[in-house]
Amino acid sequence: MSSDPWGRVDETGTVYVRTADGEQVVGSWQAGSPEEALAYFERKYEGLVVEIGLLEKRVQTTDLSAKDAQAAIDHLREQVDAHHAVGDLDALRKRLDQLVATVEARREERKAQRAKQSDEARKAKEALVAEAEELAQSDQWRAAGERLRALVDTWKGLPRLDRKSDDELWHRFSHARSAFSKRRKAHFAQLDAQREEARRTKERLVAEAEALSGSTDWGPTAARYRELMAEWKAAGRAQREHEDDLWNRFRGAQDVFFAARSSVFAERDAEQSENLKLKEELAEEAEKLLPITDLKAARAAFRSINERWEAIGHVPRDARPKVEGRMHAVERAIQEAEEAEWRRTNPEARARAEGLTGQLQAAVDKLKAQIEQARAQGNNAKADKLEKELEGRQALLDQALKGLQEFGG
């Protein structure tokens, strides 16, 4: 018979292990000496020690899930409880018990961490909702629109909450965005309606101006033209595509009338020569407003100059185009500055420009790929034809990109 502190082998070859509950049968050994039997089962014990040590390390240093860790512990405990090894099995059971406690502590720690992350995500989303609801009432259409788009990107980067809470917050967030979009559309629809009303008003003024252009009732007709001009200025701007044409017709009708009146009152040439001198001085004063750096101040200054201009009266017919052209150039520069400011703050036009640019870029990219494929297949005729089409699309894209720059993007 052979033995050591943790086991023994009796005369029949039965191997025992000593535990706190007494000796337990490990197995039977007939293949060699008792010392070899003990050495074999001690190696099995050492194997369990190594496995438990590895599992302890995995639990401490990796993100092994609690479920997987518990399954591994149960598997090792079955092996320890089977008593097929010689060594301090009670110590292994204590290590496994400690490992269970460690896994449970890690489980609670992760649970608390998830709860903390969920609470932080909830607070972050509630803050986004609050900001979105505040922005929904803003009249800063461009800035607020850009900020709302940024909030959406932030929202997408946050973890989901429980379904009910997440859906409720998203509903409020989405509703705020929709409310802002609805108000913005209504605002620009109102602007469009105002420009359409201005167009109808100016068409009526043009029709009357053209009807008066042949009148020889000089005094009353000239007075009426002044009234028409006041109504024209009060009407506001029409759509850009109509404004210049209507103005040219309106001004042209007046020119016909005043030219006729000038020919009748040739004796007023001297007076008109003096008027020309005064208007040239005003034109020079107006030209000093260029280039425009302060639109509001330039508009006010030009209005003052124009009122003095209108009060002066007419100039010799042959000198009128030049001196009025100088004034109109300044007026047009102010109008273009106003239009540039309007375009810069018009998110609807910017969106259309960006959409067109994206479509043209996609078409250019597709044609380039088709050309490359045709070249690779040796179909040069098709490639040459596609390159001509590419030139046209590229020109349109360049023009669209140039237009997009006007929006500062």
Image (cartoon, rainbow, N blue to C red):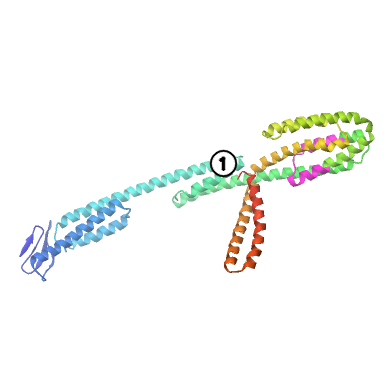
Placement of the N terminus among the 4 image quadrants: bottom left
Task: Compare residues 56 and 78 and report the one nearer the observer.
Answer: 56
Residue 162: x and y in percent read 44, 51
The relative height of residue 331 versus residue 114 in the rendered view (above or below) is above
| Magenta stretch holds residue 80 | no
Asked which quadrant contains residue 257, the reply is top right
What residue do we see at 14% from left, 63% from top? 41
| Magenta stretch holds residue 226 | yes
What residue do we see at 75% from left, 47% from top? 241
Task: Compare residues 230 and 187 and report the one nearer the observer.
Answer: 230
Start-end of magenta stretch: 224-249
Q: Is residue 395 left or right of residue 126?
A: right
The relative height of residue 105 versus residue 330 in the rendered view (above or below) is below
Asked which quadrant contains residue 386, the reply is bottom right
Residue 177: x and y in percent read 57, 46
Amino acid on which disc 1 is placed: Leu
Residue 219: x and y in percent read 91, 33
Q: Main secondary structure of the magenta part?
A: helix
Q: Which residue is mark 1?
A: 135
Q: Is residue 76 left or right of residue 350?
A: left
Q: Secondary structure at mark 1?
A: helix
